[in-house]
Image (spheres, coloured by chain):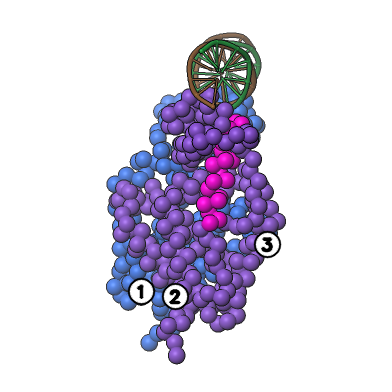
Chain colours: A blue, B purple, C green, D brown
DNA sequence: GTCTATATGTGGATAGAC
DNA sequence: GTCTATCCACATATAGAC
């Protein structure tokens, strides 16, 4: 994972050099994300990424060791964005507050960063060859902590006794779908691209079904 | 997912269709499905497909015009399977009967034919370049007929007034997820592969949440 | 640090023997 | 109808001039 060229400047005072590098890397990563999301790892070519970034092809090899290095760099960026988005599930909060918020966030994410979602989806569908570490033992631990939050809500009588793991999968799948399967959805609804109204009614529908379906009790409506 | 005509012309048309041809084509299609599902169109190689089919590479070119022809042949087979699975939504039936049946079928499909689901998913995520016709005007017509069924149920007071389109997307996404994102789910649950029990509790959880969430009334429980 | 020119390998496709 | 040997296009990667 760490084959990303890193500047360790102990004595050299060349801040402008680092800035150029940082900016070019950003441009390349952006271009690479689009190509990889559309055509997959093998399907994307360094030449087309270079064209999109408006840089000579050889520059990509200067900033990144090789094609796989560039791909993993993009992937790491996506996961970072991912992790920062959905780590606010705590048992203190009420599911009637947290769940709608979470669904809103995820749909917003699907709308704002469809490429990131699609890239991640393709990697998973392909068997996640570059995410072995990500899906190691630590992942299961993290996931168990998430399910524990739902379980505590169930124990507190705040929602029906359903399997928390599958509820989480439902939250993921139903929201990501609007990014990953956008082409199909657009064809079905006859809207290219989807309008804000479509995203809003998707959000409303999901919140209605999932909250009611889980028997989430609204704190404002009790006692 | 739809009875709209799909013309994916991949196979060569020869006057005599021998038994050998039919058998070899089957073997090749099977091998191709696995390679394409794992590595995508560009990522899969004719050589590896040939290796998996235990046939010389040139034979693939004898039975199929070219790589794209083989790919579309696989895709057509998947869509055929798809269409035969889920075209039993009619307004006469009751949602309390039809919806659980549908969810069961889709989960069963995800479990029995994960490669088909993944191949289709990758094609959609890539912008469905080989499914232009499939997602033409006819698709929207077919989809509108599906939503109309749900709308009639709503009008009959058999379920809550929610947006039928998004309910359909929810049914699709939540079930397909168990095929497409199997690697992630297996990592989260620490089960490689998923057990029958996992699929069963996925089915139960989805039926619980979606039926209750849609306010589906059980005909057996009234009057 | 940047870019041109090129080496090297892989993969799709086909000709032609059997 | 089947398969070996080969061609050719393309993509990754690098060497080396500027």
Disc 2 chain ID: B
Residue at image mark 1: A160
D10 up-or-down from A152: above or below: above
Asked whether the residues under the numbered discs 1 and 2 touch, taking CB atoms below 8 Å apart as contact, a structural biologist would say yes
Q: In the image, residue B36 lies at what x, y percent?
A: 50, 38
Q: Secondary structure at mark 3?
A: helix
Disc 3 chain ID: B
- Same chain for marks 1 and 2? no
| Disc number for residue B212 | 2
Q: Secondary structure at mark 1?
A: loop
Image point 36% across, 58% down: which residue?
A: B199
Q: Residue A66: within the magenta?
A: no
Alpha-carbon distance for marks 2 and 3?
29 Å
Alpha-carbon distance for marks 1 and 3?
38 Å
Q: Which range is magenta?
A: B64-84
Q: Is residue B202 visible?
A: yes
- The residue closer to the viewer here, A57 or A22, is A57
Residue at image mark 3: B141
* Viewer-side label of 1, 3: 3
């Amino acid at each position: 994972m760490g084959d990303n060229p890193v500047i360790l400047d102990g004595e050299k005072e060349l801040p402008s050099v680092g800035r150029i590098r940082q900016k070019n890397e950003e441009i390349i990563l952006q271009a690479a994300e689009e190509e990889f999301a559309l055509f997959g790892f093998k399907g994307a070519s360094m030449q087309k990424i270079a064209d999109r970034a408006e840089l000579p092809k050889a520059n990509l090899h200067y900033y990144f060791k090789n094609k796989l290095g560039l791909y993993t760099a993009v992937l790491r960026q996506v996961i970072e964005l991912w992790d920062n988005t959905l780590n606010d599930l705590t048992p203190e909060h009420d599911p009637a507050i947290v769940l709608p918020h979470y669904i809103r966030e995820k749909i917003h994410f699907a709308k704002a960063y469809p490429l990131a979602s699609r890239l991640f989806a393709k990697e998973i569908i392909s068997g996640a060859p570059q995410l072995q570490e990500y899906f190691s033992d630590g992942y299961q631990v993290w996931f168990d902590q998430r399910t524990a939050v739902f379980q505590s809500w169930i124990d507190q009588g705040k929602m029906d006794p359903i399997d928390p793991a599958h509820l989480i999968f439902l939250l993921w799948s139903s929201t990501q779908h609007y990014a990953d399967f956008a082409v199909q959805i657009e064809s079905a609804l006859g809207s290219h691209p989807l309008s804000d109204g479509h995203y809003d009614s998707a959000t409303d529908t999901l919140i209605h079904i999932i909250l009611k379906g889980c028997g989430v009790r609204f704190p404002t409506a009790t006692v």
